Amino acid sequence: IEFAGDAEAALKNGEFQLYLQPILSLVTETVCGYEALLRWNHPRHGLLTPDRFADVLIAERIGLRIQEHVLELALAWLRDQGDAIGVLSVNFTSAQLAGPRAAKRVLDRLAHHKIPTSSLCVEVTEGVMLDRAADSILANLRTLHDAGVSIALDDFGTGYASLAHLRSVPVDRIKIDRSFVSSIDQPNGGTIAIVRAIVGLGRGLGKVVVAEGIETEAQALRLRQLGCQLGQGYLYGRPQPQLLDIPVFPMEP
Ligand code: G
Ligand code: G
Ligand code: NA
């Protein structure tokens, strides 16, 4: 693991920072929420995106501590903004959602900050349902969903998940992966048919469909025509830093 040795100090030094990207209604083109995107402002390697340190994030203990810090940064920001912000989406790892206390931990932090449960959306990739703790993760997702937290299935259509998960997992939102959005303008690529199918599937099941990585007006128009309700991407706003000085939680015994 390239950066693993630096993670502990980085957490103390506040090198993990939250960036926020707006999520808009594609119909009204108004902001209805934000996605919290983690960045590591590394003193030697510069600003790192999570794909550069994915193994650190899934490492036992330190990965979980970083993720809990991310949630804390996100909730502190949300609390400071008041209710005008809409729903804040936060990316969760399997480890964060496994175990008997995972959902309660999240609900406790929401209550601590006096944030309504409906202001949080937990984003998971299809892969979490393939985790060996899938049963426990599913139970926690149900608890969160029943308490009013939204659940989003990220990078939809790119993983190994089965469509059956759409019935068992309490999903509120489906996120269309950026790779589909970027090729939606290309004729004969089959992408339009795929996106139409995903939107139809999502809407047919009563879910909100969100498109990621929208960069052009043409892509936005096409997605709107296909019935996709929400979208995010450079066309509307790049991820912007939110500099907050929140102390890191002490390590659990
Ligand atoms: O931030 P960027 O757009 O480069 O995202 C790269 C990937 O990292 C995306 O798949 C995104 O969902 C994921 N990601 C962003 N923030 C977090 C985070 O806080 N935790 C985890 N586990 N993944 C994140
Ligand atoms: O893992 P997730 O799918 O959430 O990834 C979001 C990633 O995509 C982040 O790294 C974010 O910085 C990046 N991103 C967000 N909007 C755009 C966009 O319009 N185009 C491209 N190429 N990347 C984007
Ligand atoms: Na995401």
Image: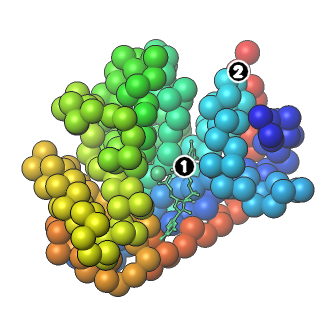
Left or right, 167 with reference to 97 = left
Above or below: residue 105 compared with residue 204: above
Q: Residue at x 49, y 33 (%)?
A: 106
- Callout 1–callout 2 Cβ contact below 8 Å: no
Q: Residue at x 38, y 28 (%)?
A: 129
In this rendered view, identify the residue nearer to me: 238 or 249. 238
| Residue 3 percent location from the top left of the image | 80, 41
Of all residues, the one furthest to the left in this rendering is 204
How would you rate the neighbour count of disc 2 (Cα within 10 Å): few for under 14, some for 14-19, many for 20 or more? few
Above or below: residue 149 compared with residue 134: below
Q: Secondary structure at mark 1?
A: helix
Of all residues, the one furthest to the right in this rendering is 44
Numbered circle sitting on residue 252: 2
Q: CA distance from mark 1 to mark 2?
A: 20 Å
Q: Amino acid at mark 1?
A: Leu
Screen quadrant of the N terminus: top right
Image quadrant assignment for residue 211: bottom left
| Residue 94 percent location from the top left of the image | 50, 29
Q: Does residue 121 appear anywhere in the picture?
A: no
Left or right, 237 with reference to 41 = left
Q: Secondary structure at mark 2?
A: loop
| Residue 248 percent location from the top left of the image | 74, 40
Q: Amino acid at mark 2?
A: Glu
Numbered circle sitting on residue 75: 1
Above or below: residue 253 compared with residue 2: above
Numbered circle sitting on residue 216: none
Above or below: residue 244 compared with residue 105: below
How would you rate the neighbour count of disc 1 (Cα within 10 Å): few for under 14, some for 14-19, many for 20 or more? many
User: Is the CB atom of the residue marked by disc 1 within 8 angstroms of ligand 1's nearest atom?
Assistant: no
Q: Residue at x 24, y 63 (%)?
A: 190
Count the marks: 2
| Residue 19 percent location from the top left of the image | 61, 61
